[in-house]
Image (cartoon, rainbow, N blue to C red):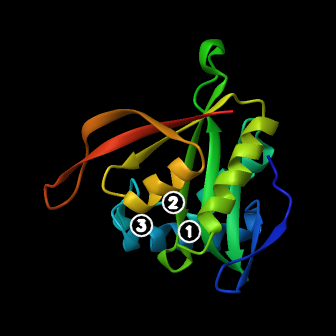
Amino acid sequence: MKIAEEQFTLQDGRTVTIRSAEERDAEAMLAYVRKTSEETHYLIRYPEEISFTLEQEHQIIGDILRSEDSAWLTVFDGDRAVGNCSISRCSGQLKVRHRCNLAIALEQAYCGLGLGTKLLSKARDTAKELGFEQLELGVYADNERAIAAYKKAGFREYGRLPRAFRLKDGTYIDEINMVLFL
């Protein structure tokens, strides 16, 4: 699904653009994924696990743009991607077609400026537009800032998966599962 372009002013006065990533943004998207995966342990991949080629990224973006049950709300500061919020159907099976997954990541320099709240609100509206009845996500149990943002947006915890993530140093972190009914 293609998301219409929207300007958003951050709390520090900078203006960013929220829109769908397009194939011309493939390099910017790869740079964004590498940067965010380097900044914290809160994402599923380590930087060295990012092996998408430019051609593969073009294909992924094209698939999302053509999709009827998923969307990317990408944040651009000029030509640079600095955040992304994705919505995707959990499964095509009839019994679970009402559910979708949400994932969000921002460069650390763009956290705490109202952008996460804005993206969660747009994601909720987009999920409703796509006909979903609930948004679901998983979050690292030690990511207090994200958990607070999700709760502020109306998500509630429904479960926890112990030792869901194992970091390179051997540390385990639980995953908190959250849901927002639309």
Residue 138 x %, y %: 44, 43
Residue extending farthest right: 4
Q: Nearer the viewer, residue 90 or 6?
A: 6
Label 3 sits on residue: 37
* Vertical arrangement, residue 71 with respect to residue 178, above or below: below
Q: Is residue 103 above or below residue 4?
A: above
Residue assigned mark 2: 52
Mark 3, secondary structure of its residue: helix
The numbered dot on residue 141 is: none
Q: Residue at x 53, y 73 (%)?
A: 112
Q: Residue at x 13, y 55 (%)?
A: 170
Q: In this rendering, does residue 65 appear at all?
A: yes
How far apart are the alpha carbons under marks 1 and 2?
Answer: 8 Å
Q: Which amino acid does label 2 sit on?
A: Phe
User: Of label 3 and label 1, which has the lower sequence position?
Assistant: 1
- Disc 1 or 2, which lies upstream in sequence? 1
The residue to which callout 1 is attached is 30
Cα–Cα gap, marks 2 and 3: 14 Å
Cβ–Cβ under 8 Å for marks 2 and 3: no
Q: Residues within 10 Å of mark 3 (few under 14, many from 20)?
A: many
Q: Where is residue 25 in the image (x, y as percent from the top left)?
A: 71, 69
Nearest to N terminus: mark 2 or mark 3: 3
Q: Are marks 1 and 2 in contact (CB under 8 Å)?
A: yes
Front: mark 1 or 2: 1
Q: What element carries label 1?
A: helix
Q: Is residue 58 visible?
A: no
Amino acid type shown at disc 3:
Ser
